[in-house]
Image: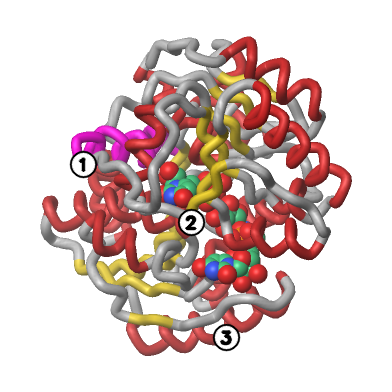
Amino acid sequence: MKILTIIGARPQFIKASVVSRAIQQAGGIEEIILHTGQHFDSNMSDIFFNQLGIPRPDLQLDIHGGGHGEMTGRMLTEIEKALLKHKPDRVMVYGDTNSTLAGALAATKLHIPVAHVEAGLRSFNMRMPEEINRILTDQISDLLFCPTSTAVRNLENEGFSSKPVKVMQVGDVMQDAALLFAEKAVAPAEGELPEAFVLATLHRAENTDNPERLANIVRALNQIHQNQVPVVLPLHPRTRKLVAEQGQALNVHIIEPVGYFEMVWLLEHCQLVLTDSGGVQKEAYFFGKACVTMRDQTEWVELVEIAANVLVGAVAHRIIQECTKNRGRQVKDLSELYGGGKASYRIVELLKKAHFLEG
Ligand code: UD1
Ligand code: UDP
């Protein structure tokens, strides 16, 4: 069986790394990796291939920037060419980025079946580019690998039970990565870090592209850093650009985006996680830390239900208040929420089974 994997953004490298590893261990599947180029700085891309042992991409498109339509359209054109050339039995896409949607759409138009890893997640906020990408990708996938029972329920509510596709709860590949690579944790090389700190990440378009929300978050982080505890912030290039453009000043401990092993170290050593990332919300939990999420909704509702995570939107006093309240609080990992580290193994088994049945 020949599978063509399409990835392009930081979280997809981390997710694909464990599935690629499981594919190699299982044998019997040839995997071709296509990197769209959506993320391209070495600390947003190469570092993950090096650290996590992801095979070098067989195909590198170098498509990034521009508006959503332009980026997705250019990817669609070039992915179609690659699919016509390599004729895979199946395409596999991850998550909810523009690379995900372009890959799924190019494949399905050529009648190549699509497997979607991280299917069924919903924020119910159609203003998020990710929500559009994931809804459309789910609609044109025939193997829907869901990370949680909530994701399965979301798809059932959208009528997937009566469609000729397979919806399967396999667990979360990010938990596989966290368990597999935890022992590789290493302190970031850049400068001396404060002894005690909270870890922040910030990049979501709904925050960075909205001057009012961004100003509130910047104000909250600055106040926490000045009055409470140092805030260590590996700064996403999108945020660096928009903070500068909007004339704001982030007075916290900023470092460049770090590799996964450094990120694991920061997660292990911080007192709390402040984030608007999807993946980092779960990683806080995997590493036993409380999480304060600077968004109005989350796709990972189970963490809010068990009070491991609290949603505070972009409201400065809420961010500060919940940081004070939750700092140093340990959360318990009830690993059955996310499958216990076996998601990639299950995905590969199911890929093989589907191929056998397709005959
Ligand atoms: C994308 C995904 C988002 C995901 C995030 C992970 C979409 C719509 N969004 O958002 O769901 O959470 O990746 O990090 O697909 N840039 C660089 N260097 C890089 C990468 C990006 O300078 O290596 C710059 C780009 O030129 C652009 C900005 O950062 O100006 C945003 O990049 P883009 O890939 O469009 O979206 P992200 O915000 O990274
Ligand atoms: N991450 C990383 N270095 C960083 C910031 C994040 O390795 O400087 C990892 C993080 O641990 C998680 C993934 O990148 O595994 C999350 O990606 P991101 O927050 O960019 O995207 P999202 O999950 O929100 O789509």
Q: Tell me where the magenta segment starts and ends, as one range.
A: 168-183
**Does 170 appear in magenta?**
yes
Q: In the rendered structure, which amino acid carries the disc numbered 1?
A: Lys
Which quarter of the picture shows residue 88?
bottom left
Dot 2: within a 10 Å radius of its alpha carbon, few (fewer than 14), some, or many (20 or more) residues?
some
Q: Residue at x 74, y 41 (%)?
A: 218
290, 306: nearer the viewer? 290
- Asked if residue 184 shows in the view, the reply is yes
304, 236: nearer the viewer? 236
Q: Residue at x 67, y 44 (%)?
A: 251
Q: In the rendered structure, which amino acid carries the disc numbered 3?
A: Thr
Q: In the rendered structure, which amino acid carries the disc numbered 2?
A: Glu
Q: Which numbered disc covers residue 223? A: none
Residue that label 3 marks: 77
Is ligand 2 within 8 Å of the beta carbon of the residue shown at mark 2? Answer: yes
User: How far apart in space, not on screen, are marks 2 and 1 (Cα)?
Assistant: 20 Å
Number of numbered markers? 3
239 to the left or right of 302: right
Which quarter of the picture shows residue 253?
top right
**Percent x, y of residue 277:** 58, 42
- The quadrant of the picture occupied by the C terminus is bottom left
Looking at marks 1 and 3 on the same chain, the residue that comes earlier in the sequence is marked by 3
- The quadrant of the picture occupied by the N terminus is bottom left
User: How far apart in space, not on screen, are marks 1 and 3 (Cα)?
Assistant: 39 Å
Q: Residue at x 71, y 22 (%)?
A: 320
